[in-house]
Amino acid sequence: MIRFSFSSLYMSLLFANVMILFLYLAFQNQKLLLKFGLPMTGAVLLAVIMRMLVPLEFLHISHNIYFPEAVSQVICKFLHPQFFGDRFSYWSFAKMIWLAGILIFAVRTLKRERATAKLIADESYEIPETAPAYHIFCKIQEELPRTSRIELRVLPLIHVPMIYGLRHPYILLPEHFDLDKRSLYYILRHESTHYLHHDLLLKVLIKIFCIVYWWNPFCKPLQKQTDMILEMRVDQEIAKNPRQKIEYTLCIETVMQHLLNPTSAPSPEPMSSISFCKKSCSATIQRISMLLENETPSHKWIRYTLVSFITILFVLSFTYIFEASSEVSTEITEEILRIDVSNTYFIEKSDGTYEFYLNGDYWETVDSIKYFDKDIPIYKEGGEIK
């Protein structure tokens, strides 16, 4: 049996936030990041996203670990219905606030996306065929036929190249963006590779994911770290030999100098877009350091060990669930001690929960009845006995 509950949600958040914190600390230490490498970091992010997408409890494999009594009482009070005729609990209000926040952030994001899309449609223009970037991009499209859908345009409002659009992809270049042909090739190839890897779709999914968990303070670091991983993966695919790495590094530095110009205003960056560089020196240093890293066999065992450890934690987060020692409120404990099969019964709800009735009065809704007397009658909604 599979169920969603308060316990399964906080187990999901506990695992995800511990992993995000681990990644955040790893990104602060340059040597640690180089030792972990790109594959391990990507594995952590994948585990985090998968766990938060599945905040469920699989009852046939899960085992409960009970909190101390003091913690259990707090959780029970949070879950126990006590408002509006004992139909709503603090947890009920929390779920309503959660849903309202999702709607607010979703509407706000969609409005911003529509405004930016209109701005790009109105202000951008096709790059002249006489421009060096036009001929370089034609060459890239010959090398990579799958990029034929991408259109190359100029957008005066931006200060760094970006790829934009899921259905109709554009590579947008700043106006008067004068670089040598080699740098233009690396930039256009970089943005084209994002399209080939479906990174735009992945970034949108991460954004949706963060809208759903809008109240989680670790979502913003997750977005930044995911963006960094996407950039590092493309960097390593394009610049493979030492000469390419040096040229590519010089290209990144040139674009950063243009981006850090004091006269440059903030550029629009829609959800469905990926910029070549961000206005962050620390992020740029991490990209370059990872690009120039020399792979050494001595580091591989560390990565394999860590990936195995993360996988084990991922499985254990489903296997062991921290629970309150009793989901029955302490306020009714004395009445519960006097219950028997003649004055109590349950009504099984369609969502797998059970309404508990004592002396004909509704008391609360519980997720599990395995700790109650097995002889207590259980009715289905509508009055039919189970």
Image: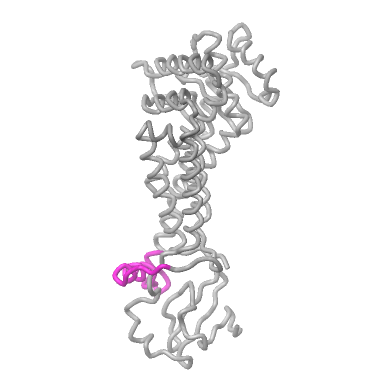
Rendered-image quadrant of the C terminus: bottom right
Q: Residue at x 37, y 18 (%)?
A: 260
> Which residue is situated farthest in the left direction here?
70
| Rendered location of residue 324, percent (x, y) | 38, 70
> Which residue is situated farthest in the top direction here?
130
Is there any visible trace of residue 25 in the rendered image?
A: yes
Q: Residue at x 40, y 62 (%)?
A: 93
Is there any visible trace of residue 106 in the rendered image?
A: no
Instruction: Quadrant for residue 149, please give it.
Output: top right
The one of 27 and 262 positioned closer to us in this rendering: 27
The one of 125 and 290 positioned closer to us in this rendering: 290
Q: Residue at x 43, y 86 (%)?
A: 358
Would residue 259 appear left or right of 62 to someone viewing this image? Answer: left
Q: Is residue 378 above or below residue 42?
A: below
Would residue 267 appear left or right of 332 to someone viewing this image? Answer: right
Residue extent of the magenta highlight: 65-91
> Which residue is situated farthest in the bottom direction here?
342
